């Protein structure tokens, strides 16, 4: 508007130039900046980041809030999620009845005082590993009962270990009996112990455990967890060799007659049960599934070495600290 009159007084060529210049000088305001999201309050029990390689099922399911694990409190901060349970049922999480939760908590308290659990907890806490909350004198914070989801793979789970939250969760709505509670607790504590075997010493912290194990280590941990937890028959079971004996962890062979033959047959059946259970776990979740690796090949390569690895139990003598996994695990990772 100011260049045109001046250019007109100087002649037609400059007037045309002024019009072109005015077109290029047209001001276009920039778009407004996007609004910043309102920060949400994070609690100690929330996930700030989720490692997709956790040795547990996917912690977040975007399709259904009910498929989130029992210890994922982020859903209760979601305005679109169902309201949290009332004060009269502080543990319900919308699933298990209060009576189921109370029964689970009582059984869990007794299981934490059992010999297997105390041996595992003692080794973990004595080593300074951070894999579990609580302490050797008061291990109660390391495990709790909750109502678990029932969709998909969750319907087959009795409990799980969450390395990021340093805690074991038992599914109270599965109405586990005393032995099932103890076996499930020990199963998950074996996973915690195995995380400690890959821990690194951090000043002012202790031995920091990893949030995930590699595929071969996960396979080894599943074998050990099913052996020392779910498949436990007791060290004095008449039909099987003690779980720390060399004959149980050895590959099948020979045969034998009479009592020795029946023991060998029973041990072979139990090896098959442990192998099948570990394979199912590896196929459905964990680092092997996330990495799209063949879990059967990895499992087969470490199976017998890990079947004979009964740490921290060594023929009835617990070890004071965590020790490395069998060499076959490192070889399988290669």
Image (cartoon, rainbow, N blue to C red):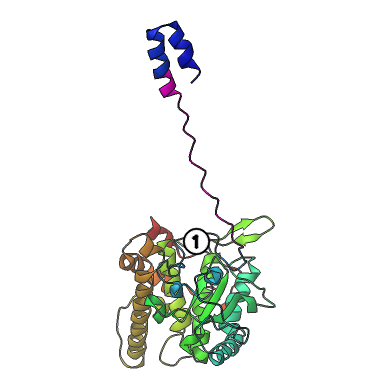
Residue at the image position 68 percent from the left and 78 percent from the top? 138
User: Residue 134's image quarter?
Assistant: bottom right
In magenta segment, residue 280: no
User: Residue 110's image quarter?
Assistant: bottom right
Q: Residues within 10 Å of mark 1 (few under 14, many from 20)?
A: few
Quadrant, the C terminus: bottom left
Reply above or below: 172 against 198: below
Residue at the image position 56 percent from the left and 78 percent from the top? 84
The residue pinned by badge 1 equals: 50
Q: Between residues 45 and 221, which one lies in front from this camera angle? A: 45
Q: Horizontally, is 234 left or right of 107 in the view?
A: left
In magenta segment, residue 39: yes
Residue 131: percent from left, percent from top: 58, 67
Residue 20: percent from left, percent from top: 39, 18
Q: Horizontally, is 90 left or right of 186 in the view?
A: right
Q: Secondary structure at mark 1?
A: loop
Residue 67: percent from left, percent from top: 43, 74
Q: Between residues 104 and 88, which one lies in front from this camera angle? A: 88
User: Residue 206's image quarter?
Assistant: bottom right
Instruction: Give the residues drawn in magenta, as a range.
Output: 20-41
Residue 291: percent from left, percent from top: 36, 59
Q: Is residue 328 visible?
A: no
Residue at the image position 38 percent from the left and 67 percent from the top? 302
Which residue in the rendered view is the most extreme toward the top?
10
Reply above or below: 116 against 165: below
| Image mark count | 1
Q: Between residues 322 and 204, which one lies in front from this camera angle? A: 204
Q: Is residue 285 visible?
A: yes
Give the overall secondary structure of the magenta segment: loop
């Amino acid at each position: 508007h100011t260049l045109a009159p001046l250019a007109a007084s100087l002649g037609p060529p400059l007037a045309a130039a002024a019009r072109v210049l005015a077109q290029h000088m047209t001001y276009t305001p920039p778009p407004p900046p996007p609004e910043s999201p309102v920060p949400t309050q994070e609690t100690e029990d929330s996930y700030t980041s989720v490692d997709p390689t956790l040795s547990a099922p996917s912690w977040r399911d975007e399709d259904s809030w009910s498929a989130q694990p029992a210890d994922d409190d982020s859903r209760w901060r979601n305005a679109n999620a169902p309201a949290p349970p009332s004060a009269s049922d502080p543990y319900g999480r919308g699933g298990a009845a209060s009576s189921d939760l109370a029964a689970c908590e009582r059984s869990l308290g007794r299981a934490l005082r059992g010999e297997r659990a105390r041996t595992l907890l003692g080794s973990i806490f004595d080593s300074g590993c951070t894999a579990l909350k609580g302490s050797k004198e008061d291990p109660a914070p390391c495990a709790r009962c909750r109502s678990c989801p029932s969709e998909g793979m969750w319907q087959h789970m009795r409990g799980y270990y969450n390395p990021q939250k340093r805690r074991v969760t038992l599914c109270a709505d599965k109405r586990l009996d005393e032995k099932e509670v103890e076996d499930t607790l020990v199963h998950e504590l074996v996973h915690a112990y195995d995380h400690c075997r890959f821990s690194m010493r951090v000043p002012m912290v202790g031995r920091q455990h990893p949030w995930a194990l590699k595929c071969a280590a996960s396979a080894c941990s599943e074998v050990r967890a099913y052996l020392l937890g779910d498949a436990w028959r007791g060290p004095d079971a008449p039909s099987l060799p003690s779980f720390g004996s060399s004959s149980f962890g050895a590959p099948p062979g020979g045969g034998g007659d009479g009592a020795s033959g029946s023991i060998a047959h029973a041990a072979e059946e139990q090896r098959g049960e442990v192998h099948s259970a570990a394979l199912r776990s590896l196929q459905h979740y964990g680092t092997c599934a996330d990495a799209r690796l063949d879990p059967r090949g990895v499992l087969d390569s470490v199976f017998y070495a890990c079947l004979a690895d009964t740490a921290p139990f060594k023929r009835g003598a617990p070890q004071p600290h965590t020790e490395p996994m069998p060499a076959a695990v490192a070889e399988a990772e290669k």
